[in-house]
Image (tube, grey):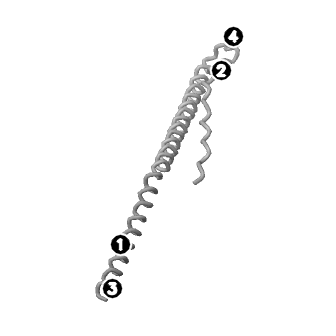
Amino acid sequence: MVASCHSDIDNKTKLQALTLINDCNKYKMDLATGGAICSEALRYVTQKQEQINTLQMLDKRIEESKENGQEEEEDDSSSGSDGSNDDDDNGSQPPPEEPVPPPTEPEPEPEP
């Protein structure tokens, strides 16, 4: 009778060990397939950082163009006060600004 009790404990221990091994294998598979999710998340973050950098550069260009526009207005007002006739320059305008490329459209976020 002692031998049957001992074998029952061994069977229960083996069953628990196999259950634990099975759970570990499931977690390993989750981690192995989750690498694609991590790569996708890194790509998304990198793309957003590039968009932020692009927007910051556009803001700097706009500020510089505003500053240049104000300086040119000041130069025009000071040069026009000397009493000379400025009719032959046909109201010279500053050269047109370079077109600013629009920010790239964000890709739709992947659904989990």
| First-in-chain label (2 vs 3) | 3
Q: Alpha carbon of mark 2 to alpha carbon of mark 3: how far?
A: 101 Å
The residue at which mark 4 appears reads as: 88
* CB within 8 Å, label 1 to label 2: no
Image position, residue 27 (x, y; %): 43, 60
Lateral position of residue 94 relative to residue 60, left or right: right
Q: Which of 70 and 104 is in front in this view?
A: 104
Looking at the image, tell me whether mark 1 or mark 2 is earlier in sequence order: 1
- Callout 3 amino acid: Cys
Q: Which of marks 3 and 1 is nearer the N terminus?
A: 3
Can you identify the residue that label 2 sits on? 93
Q: Mark 3 points at which residue?
A: 5
Q: Nearer the viewer, mark 4 or mark 2?
A: 2
Residue in the picture at 67% in, 13% down: 89
Q: How crowded is mark 4: few (under 14 residues within 10 Å), some or many (20 or more)?
A: few
89 and 60: which one is in front? Answer: 60
- Please name the amino acid that badge 2 sits on: Gln
Q: Where 89 falls versus 57 (above or below)? A: above
SS for callout 1: helix
Q: How crowded is mark 1: few (under 14 residues within 10 Å), some or many (20 or more)?
A: few
Question: How far across and down, in percent of the image, does residue 92 sit?
Answer: 66, 17
On screen, residue 24 above or below 15: above
Above or below, 47 against 33 in this view is above
Residue 96 image point, x, y percent? 63, 22
The residue depicted at 61 percent of the width and 25 percent of the height is: 97
Q: Which of marks 4 and 3 is nearer the N terminus?
A: 3
Q: Considering the numbered disc 4 on the image, is that residue within a helix, a strand or a loop?
A: helix
Q: What kind of element bears circle 3?
A: helix
Q: Which mark is residue 14?
A: 1
Q: In which quarter of the image is the N terminus?
A: bottom left
Name which of mark 1 and mark 4 comes first in the sequence: 1
Label 4 is placed on what type of residue?
Asp
